[in-house]
Image (tube, rainbow, N blue to C red):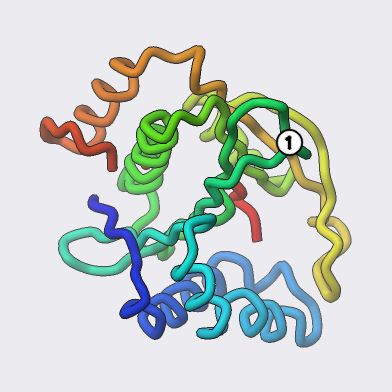
């Protein structure tokens, strides 16, 4: 598994990859034309180009054997609504279904953790649908704890899936060597370059 930070030249690729991975994971969470409208709002080229041009957001393309199999989106701007310390948030992480169970998500998230530490962040947040027990348990195994509850307020999303758990990882309480060693094991080779939200919609 490897991560490649996306740039402006990746806008078309990213638009297609984001739409494909999200649709395959969450198409049945929507009603009516909700999915179509969401994809148009979140992954249109104008928005992607704007976010890739700034420093607040980062998109990373997840690759396996030179194939693009997923993406993740991060917000590195500290949110005072989340906490009073330096924090960041994993907004999206999606991987094609055919590549699940390979440890790709774990390696990708480990990279995010390492990068957040290097940037001086003290907390990493993400959100996950509160009925998604597999995802919640996965994040707990990596050290995330429940922080608060929130709710999706978007049109045409199934009512029973609107509840969200916000989770947090305390980065300053972890030793950096712990993440470095963990990344070495999950990635399969030694490196000093760390390669790891919501799962949110």
Q: How many marks?
A: 1
Does 160 sit left or right of 101 as displayed?
right
Hey, which quadrant is residue 130 in on the image? top right
Residue at (64, 26) in percent of width and height: 85
Does 58 sit left or right of 111 as displayed?
right
Q: Position of residue 100 (x, y in %)?
A: 39, 53
The residue tagged 1 is: 82
Residue at (57, 78) in percent of width and height: 47
Residue at (41, 35) in percent of width and height: 119
User: Which is more toward the observer, 176 or 132?
Assistant: 176
Q: Residues within 10 Å of mark 1 (few under 14, many from 20)?
A: some
User: Which is more toward the observer, 102 or 167?
Assistant: 167
Q: Position of residue 73 (x, y in %)?
A: 49, 57
In the displayed image of the protein, which residue is found farthest to the front? 54
Q: Quadrant of the C terminus?
A: bottom right
Q: Position of residue 42 (x, y in %)?
A: 62, 74
Residue at (23, 50) in percent of width and height: 1
In the displayed image of the protein, which residue is found farthest to the left? 189
Hey, which quadrant is residue 64 in on the image? bottom left
Vertical comparison of 59 with 89: above or below: below
Does 71 sit left or right of 33 as displayed?
left
Q: Position of residue 16 (x, y in %)?
A: 43, 82
Does 71 sit left or right of 154 as displayed?
left
User: Which is more toward the observer, 93 or 60?
Assistant: 60
């Amino acid at each position: 598994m490897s991560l490649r930070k996306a740039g402006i030249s990746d806008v078309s690729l990213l638009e297609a990859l984001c739409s494909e991975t999200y649709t395959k994971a969450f198409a049945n969470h929507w009603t009516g034309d909700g999915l179509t409208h969401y994809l148009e709002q979140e992954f249109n080229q104008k928005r992607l180009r704007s976010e890739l041009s700034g420093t607040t957001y980062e998109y990373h393309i997840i690759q396996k054997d030179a194939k693009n199999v997923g993406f993740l989106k991060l917000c590195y701007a500290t949110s005072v609504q989340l906490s009073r310390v330096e924090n960041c948030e994993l907004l999206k992480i999606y991987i094609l279904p055919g590549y699940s169970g390979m440890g790709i998500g774990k390696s990708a998230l480990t990279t995010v953790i390492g990068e957040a530490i290097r940037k001086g962040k003290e907390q990493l947040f993400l959100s996950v649908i509160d009925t998604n027990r597999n995802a919640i348990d996965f994040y707990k195994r990596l050290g995330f704890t429940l922080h608060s509850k929130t709710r999706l307020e978007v049109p045409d999303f199934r009512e029973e899936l609107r509840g969200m758990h916000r989770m947090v990882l305390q980065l300053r309480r972890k030793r950096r060597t712990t993440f470095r060693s963990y990344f070495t094991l999950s990635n399969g080779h030694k490196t000093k370059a760390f390669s790891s939200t919501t799962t949110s919609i």
